[in-house]
Amino acid sequence: MNLRSKWEFGEARECRRGLLCGMGISPEEQARPLIGIVNSWNEYNPGHVHLKALAERVKQGVRDAGGFPVEVMTTGICDGMVLKDPKYVEIPSRNSIADQVEITAEGNFFDGMVMLSTCDSIVPGHLMAAARLDIPTVVVTGGYMPLGTFRGREVLHIHAQDKVGTMKAGKIDPDEYNGLIEHSWGTCGGCTSMTTANSMCMVAEALGMSLPGNSTVSAVSSELALIAYRAGERVMALVKDGITARKIITPASIRNAIKMDMAVAASSNLILHIPAIAHEAGYDEPWWKYFDEASNEIPLLAHLAPSGPYNLHDLDLAGGLPAVLKELLPKLDGDCLTVTGKTLAENVAGARRYPISGAGRAGNVCGAAGDNVCGAPRAASENVIHTLAEPVMRKPGIGVLYGNLAPEGAIIKIAAVPEHLFTFTGPARVFDSLHAALDALRAGEVKPGDACVLRFMGLKGRFGTTAFTFQEELKGHAELYNSCAVITDGRFSGGTSGLSVGYVSPEAALVGPLGLVKDGDTIVIDIPNRRIDMQVDDAELARRKASFSWTFDESAYPRYLRLFVKNVGSMAHGGIWE
């Protein structure tokens, strides 16, 4: 083995040897390959509170396979715990996490890494670092969160969140509302729906960077503990065989991940994170174009919440991601290498999909007696995972819209859009901040049929703030949710639904057309033809552009966010450092 951690004899090496001895590290341990256990455990992220114990299992696997594991930490912010205030740091933290890993892994000359993470921006931050550093790496993701229970029935968090607007409007009993919110999340793991955390865990597995089945096991299962141990063993095999991250993260495996995204209608935030991983690996390709192509090629094989009736526990029971990938295999490059040392096709050869039983079990989430939020009881047996021949639907999951409002593209989660809103024409209602939009909504100033433009929320404008809070409150007003469009240069949560268009590029802060929209301009959205336009002629747009003025207020933000704005690049490249 050609180990980075074993330098030639010299003063620096002797200093290091002495320091290690001073910490009680034996010469035998020092002679082993040095494996960084890159953990993102902390006590304030429910997706990560269990990773401390999981890391111990990883270290045991490394030791048993002949390595010397050392645990180091990275930031781990939960998007659900971050109040969406002007100092929004969740997306900027992703780039910082990749930098933290680079600093620690390069400074300590790790021979390999096992990376532990679960949530929205931490998983992509770790994968970006793995692609950047190109050393042997295995990713262990933290599993999905157990379902909560309330009044004798299971509670799915995303449907409890849907009640925020209903509560504000006084249309739900406060005791029921509080019970739903207080009992809708389990003890640890990724939120139990197809939101960004679970989506990114599946990306890690589809790329081949985590062990088969890792992304769709419960956070409290014995299986996850075994996967952690096996990951420790496997990283040692990768080091011995010289298999580095870029032998696994390839253009072909990235396309596999994009196709998996479409098959499960994963979070629209993958449109930002997957290109970021690709560009960190040095693959400068038109990744948004591939998303659009895949959206037309790949049908929906698993209809998961928030757009469908099933959750991650259901998917786990039905065979997990390996079963999805096996059904999808004719559309994938099955020859891609994975951390198992085998190909993707070999990994899923024995996978099976199982119909789940659920007679009398609630389909969605608990509510008051007779409340249709609970959904209908399940049939005695039903398929969660479908086949290519008989998919859930052939309607694309995520689409890329183009037009004079989004020359570089805009993203829509098609599977979550009500069919009657596939074509839309309405007047623009323009808001230059999330708070302005929320104030107008709460004051009754948003009218049915409005095109609600929330701008200066992109990466340079406001650090990639999500419009999710506005969308969630809109859901509490059925007449608005079923008639309005939401158009933003900010991100979406993985739980986004309705006629919601995000990531409009170039963003308003870059003098994109979204920054030129005025109240009353007619906005036209045509999802079947992938168009989003404003009915304003080119001459008028040129006049508006000539008088456009916007400046980032550095005085309002701390130093890291100012640094982020100065250095972050295009969303189409994933918003990496440029």
Image (cartoon, rainbow, N blue to C red):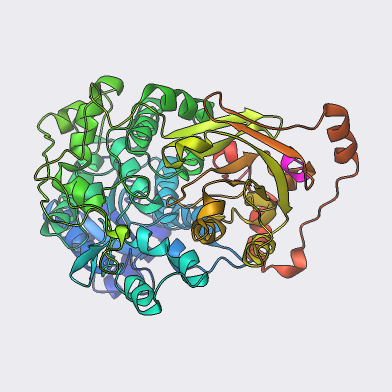
Q: What stretch is highlighted in magenta?
A: 511-515
Q: Which residue is drawn at 32% across and 45% down?
A: 308
Whether residue 352 is visible: yes
Residue 250 percent across, percent down from the top left: 38, 29
Q: Residue at x 57, y 55 (%)?
A: 467
Q: Is residue 98 left or right of residue 502?
A: left
Residue 164 percent across, percent down from the top left: 46, 67
Q: Which residue is drawn at 49% across and 39% down?
A: 271
Q: Quadrant of the N terminus?
A: top left
Magenta highlight on residue 512? yes
Q: Nearer the viewer, residue 19 or 531?
A: 531
Q: Residue at x 38, y 57 (%)?
A: 119
Q: Nearer the viewer, residue 79 or 132?
A: 79
Find the residue positioned furthest to the front.
370
Q: Which is the main secondary structure of the residues drawn in magenta?
A: helix
Name which quarter of the figure residue 409 lies in: top right
Q: In this view, does 309 lie to the left or right of 79?
A: left
Q: Which of 381 and 322 is in front in this view?
A: 381
Q: In this view, does 423 lie to the left or right of 250?
A: right
Residue 569 percent across, percent down from the top left: 63, 43
Find the residue positioned furthest to the bottom.
175
Q: In which quarter of the image is the C terminus?
A: top right
Residue 24 percent across, percent down from the top left: 24, 73
